Amino acid sequence: MAELNIPKVELQEAIQLALATWGQMCDASFQALADRFGAEEAIEILRPHLEKVGEPAPIFAEMMGITGNDATTIASLFCLYEQEVLKVEGKVTEASPDRVVKESYQCPFQSLSPGFCQAFTLVAEGMGKAINPEYKITTTKMMTAGDSHCEWIIEKK
């Protein structure tokens, strides 16, 4: 009988590997669309599908004990996902019910293309719309585009 020698992988290492693989797959998928249709058209093709990924945000927020529907609520959910799931390192530099600004300095995806971050922003837009469509999410800086850090803003339209 044939046997395989499969080494054990610690949980944290497995999570990092899964994130890296997921990020590279998403980045490659976006790049294939951008190569075929151009980056702007690729974003528009992906928009409805990726925004839909964010639609369960109110259920996720409720499960995590996050209540409300203002900018701080939306940002709390984003930060939970970024910090606790993706292990993005950064800080909130401004927070009020109408506007939240966050800067990030370390991200498992910072070496990917700007298209990856643009696509990820579409998921965030879907999350924000599901919680309260009166708010918008804007990504103003991206390490993937050569900026020293990433920055996103949630604010009332």
Image: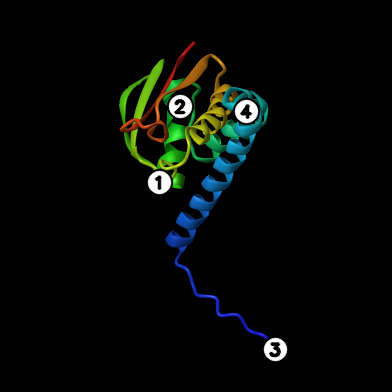
Q: Position of residue 79 (x, y in %)?
A: 42, 35
The answer to which of marks 4 and 2 sits earlier in the sequence is 4
Q: Earlier in the sequence, mark 1 or mark 2?
A: 2
Among numbered discs 2 and 3, the one appearing first in the sequence? 3
CA distance separating discs 2 and 3 = 56 Å
In the displayed structure image, the side of residue 8 where residue 91 appears, left or right: left
Spatial CA span between label 1 and label 2: 19 Å
Q: Amino acid at mark 4?
A: Ala
Location of residue 72 in the rendering, given as x and y in whole percent from the top left corner: 41, 24
Q: In what element is the residue under mark 4?
A: helix
Q: Which mark is residue 42?
A: 4
Secondary structure found at label 2: helix
User: Closer to us: mark 2 or mark 3?
Assistant: 3
- Tell me residue 47's x, y (percent): 63, 26
Whether the residues at callouts 2 and 3 have beta carbons within 8 Å, the answer is: no
**Extreme residue toward the bottom, this view:** 1
Viewer-side residue, 43 vs 136: 43
Disc 3 marks a residue whose amino acid type is Met
What residue sits 44% from the left and 61% below the top? 13
